[in-house]
Every structure is written in C-alpha cells, then in structure tokens.
Amino acid sequence: METGNPHKDAHWSRWLLLIWGVMSALLIAFRWQNIDFFILADTDDNLRLAQVKAWLGGQDWSDLRQYKLNPPMGADIHWSRIPDLPIAGIMLLLEPFMGWINAQKAAIALAPLIPFGLALYAHALTVRRLVDPRAWPLAVAILISGASFLTMFAPTRIDHHGWQLAFLALTLTGLFDEKRLRGGLTTGCATALSLSVGLEMLPYLALCGGVIGLRWIIDAAQALRLRAYGVALAGGTALGFALFASQANHALRCDALTPVWLSTMVLAGAMLTALSYLPTRHWTPRLACAGVAGLGLAGFFYAAWPQCLTRPEGISDELYRTWFVNITEVRPLYVQSAKTAVTAAALPVAGLVGAVSMLWLDRAKRVLWMQVVLLSLVSVLMMFWQMRAAPAAQLLAVPGAVGLAWTLMLPLARARHMAARMVMPPIIFLLLSGLIGQLVMSVWPAPEVKATGRAAIRNASARCATLSALRPVAALPPATIFTFVDLSPRLINVTGHSAISGPYHRNGDAILDVFRVFRGTPAEARRIITAHRASYLLICPNMAEGANHKKFAPKGFLAQLERGQVPDWLTPVALPATSPLRLWRVVPLEGRQN
C-alpha cells in the first residue's frame, strides 16, 4: 500500500472537523421540522429526555427509576447516565439565553452530533492506519452511506445507540494502532465505556478482545497490547460501574453492567494481564494457556451466573410471546421487507467482500485484515438474528469496503483514458458503499399491498404523538392515564401526567397489564385499570400497537371501544373534533378513589 506524505496530510483532522460541521448543519436543516415541533418519534428518545429532566429536577444521580411510569413505585429502567450528560449540559448551558423549552430543542438537535463526530474521527483514523493515510475521506463517504448507521445520529435521536456505535468505532481504532500500549489502552477503555452505557455491543466487544488475544498467541511481541487491554478492561469497567451504575443495577441482573458483568470483565482483564507476562517464545504454550484461561472464564460464568445463560432480558415466556417477538428491531433480517433488508445489508455484505479480497490484495497486513473479516462476518450473521444489529454491521463494514475501493481506485488516477478516471470511481463507490442496493430498491416496483390499513396506521402513529394532539390532554390536572405501551413515553415526556408502562423489559408485569386490558374483557379491563389507580383511559385508534391488539383479540376491549361499545364506567372527555385521540374518565368503583 502507498503511504501519503506526512506533511501533506498533517491537517487532515481539521478537514474532518470541517466536514463534521457541515454535515451536522445539513442534518439539523433536514430535521428542522422535527426539532422545531419537538418530534421525538422513538419511545427511547422520549424516555431519555424525561429521565434527564427528572435528574435536573432533583432525582438522585444513581436513581434511574422512572416514577411517572407505574406510579407510585415507578418503572425500573436499566440505562446509564452517560448519554444524559451532554443532553443535560446543553440544556443547562443554554437555558439562561433561550429559555427552558428552546434549550430542550437545542439539546435534542445537538446532543446526537457529539457521538457522530467521535464515530467519524475514529473510523477516519482506523482507515488511515489500516489502508492509507489519504483514504480517510472515502471512509467518511462510505460510513454516511449506511442509512441504518446515520439514522442513529440524526438530530432528535438522543438515546444511547449513537454512543454505543461511537465507542465501537473507537474500539476498532485501538485494534489497528501500531503503538501497542496506546492501542491496548484505547480498545480496553472504549470497551469499558461501551459496557457502562449498555450491553448491545457485547458480541463485537468480546470478539475484539478475542482478536487481541489471538494476535498475542501468534506473536509474543503483542504482549504489551494484551497487558494494556487487560488492565484497561478491568480497571475501566470497575470505574464505570462505580460512577454510572444505578441503584437497580447493583442487583444480579443480566441486561446491563451489574455485578454479573463487572465480575466477569474484571476476571477477564486480570486473566489477560497475567497471560501477557508468560515468558514463552513458542506459540503452542501461549495457545494452551489462553485456552485454559478461556475455559476458566466460561466455567466461572456458568457456575456463578447460570440465570444469564438464557435470555439476558430475564423476561417471562408470556411476555416474550405476547410482546418481545413482535418488536420490529428484534426480528431477523429475513422477515423484513425486501427494501428494508437490502438497505440494511448492502453495505455490510460489500464490506465483507472487500475485507476478504484484501486478504490477497494486501498480504503485508493479512493478520490485520483477518480481524476485519472476522468482525464483518459476525456482524452480517448477527443481522440474521436481530435486525437491530444493522447499524453496527454497517459501521464494521467500512474498513473492508474502503480497503477494496481504495485499492481499485488508486490505479485509475493514473489511467490514460479520461473515461476510466471519470466513470469507474463512482461505479466502484456505488457498489462498495451499498448505495447501489438502496438506489435499486428506490426505483424497484413495490409489491401490491392489499388494503390492510397500513397508511392509516402510519398516519395515526405519527399524529397521536404530536404536541398539538396531546395539548388538550396536557391541559388536564396531572393524573395517571392508562394508555398504550408505545404512547406512554411520549405522554410522560410532554405532559405532567403519569402512565403505566413503556416498552422496557424489566417492567414485564406492567406491560402485560396493558396488553390484558386492551385484549381482554371490559370487566377485566376495569379491574386492572382500577388496580393501577388510573383516572383516565386514552387510546389512539389505528396506532400500530392498537392494530396488534385488535389482530390478536378482534373482540377484545380495544376493538369494542373503537366500535363505540363503551362501558358505563367510562365517561367521555371532550377533545377537539380533529383530534386523533379518544379519552375517557374512569368512574371509580364505589368507595374507591382513583
């Protein structure tokens, strides 16, 4: 591979900063309507902002319960405070100048762009180290071609997913750092930060750790990288737990950085550090010792935390069947629509092809390219398990795609024919960025869809969450409102009301209560609503969640309400004629006040 002139590209990071600034401005302009109308379309983004406001309102740093869900005990939320910090910082910084409401709008616009900048920088640095110092603009161009990836950093996407991707990109940067101490520390610290935010990237992080161990087995000179990684992993995870673990995450749960994963990561880091001191010169003793350490770690986890060998969410079979398997992002790639599947998978597949090709095209770095192949292959396979792996798969595809694209484009710069110089590079880019798949699907005739009401569902899901729709509800005195699981985070974020549950797995009983109300009988509905001391019942006809309730219970309580069969213990509350919502006051049982 050719290397660039170090003096010529010394200011590459300044150019990257400029590109980040321009792209950030474009993203804000593109999403301006959502920002201005305070549209946080995702349930997690709404709950994240509600969590930040609760913290700024006096809730304890280590108390992440959401007391506006399932009052008075609140809902157990397994998240971290790390993504709260930039949101809260922007709000506190700007409130004196623009007021509380506009400070919130600024926060939802700007906060996602911080991890976006980190992800761009980390990947540009990775490509400079792995491919060519001059190839970083190509890395940026291919990275932002991943629609699933870019969506996670769009303004209003303030939840933790962008930070997870940024820390994963930083983990890769350490893997390809020639300075072993710095590389090991970078990968270990980025892994610890990612785990402190959540466990979504755990398979990739574990694979990165395994790759560092494998490189040490092959080459004893990698001992310093292994040692630095082990120390950073153990120490960073312990520090992350001490600083950011919520009170609820001190329990032995499997879905966050709890004592379960803290002990596992500290032990893993200690083992790796110990292995790095082995004075063996031949690879076979290193392989044997690493195998013993791996088996020991697996044995510890099996013996100490057997409850975590199944679903990490720890949900019941009923909740899994009723709710979890119907979440779009946890369904596999092959059940998605063709457009969704191709848009998500085109770049990861191109990246995998590129990485495999580079094993032969760049033999001097074959060991490094094997790492890329492993990460790309695992990320592609993960999409066949759950669709939510797509953003990470697109991120991990970039080194392979850039490597092959750069190798093919570089000779074209010296080609005799202008046609080759002008035509071939865009074609190569379209193929290896995955954009060709997106372009084809954008013009491919969509299959004829029967009149299933999908347009009505999309329209209702969007309209019911708007500020204008919820403003009359917000005008009522604060109360507990029984409503859909997917509408509840928005309700508690933009009104003073409380709700029963959002789509958060630790609150399975409350989720099932909502499902039982809307799928059950009026008598069962009244019993459950009364038990939760809800004063109002709120529905959004044709909302996606409601459509599912009616699909599974066509004669259930929700279906009856939408047909106008309202029991006498519900009193209608007047809303504007144009409102997409329907609201009733719950008549309390005799002798009981809601």
Image (cartoon, rainbow, N blue to C red):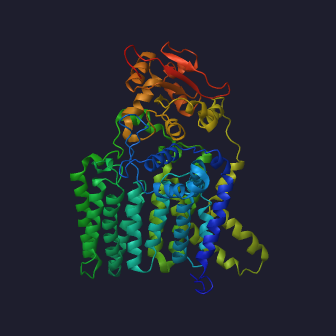
Nearer to us in this view, 260 or 593: 593
Q: Is residue 38 above or below residue 298?
A: above
Q: Position of residue 591 (x, y in %)?
A: 37, 15
Q: Position of residue 495 (x, y in %)?
A: 53, 37
Q: Quadrant of residue 287?
A: bottom left
Q: Please give the name of the residue rendered at 58% of the width and 62% of the height, measured from the top-left corner.
A: 350
Nearer to us in this view, 471 or 331: 471
Q: How many marks?
A: 0
Q: Is residue 219 above or below residue 196?
A: below
* Image quarter in which the C terminus is found: top left
Tell me if I can see residue 134 in this picture: no
Q: Please give the name of the residue rendered at 53% of the width and 15% of the height, measured from the top-left corner.
A: 566
Residue found at the far right of this picture: 418
Give left or right: position of 228 versus 25. Answer: left
Tell me if I can see residue 298 in this picture: yes
Q: Position of residue 159 (x, y in %)?
A: 50, 51
Nearer to us in this view, 414 or 588: 588
Q: Position of residue 215 (x, y in %)?
A: 37, 74
Q: Please give the name of the residue rendered at 48% of the width and 29% of the height, measured from the top-left corner.
A: 481
* Image quarter in which the N terminus is found: bottom right
Q: Quadrant of residue 523?
A: top left
Residue found at the far front of this picture: 96
Q: Is residue 397 above or below residue 543?
A: below
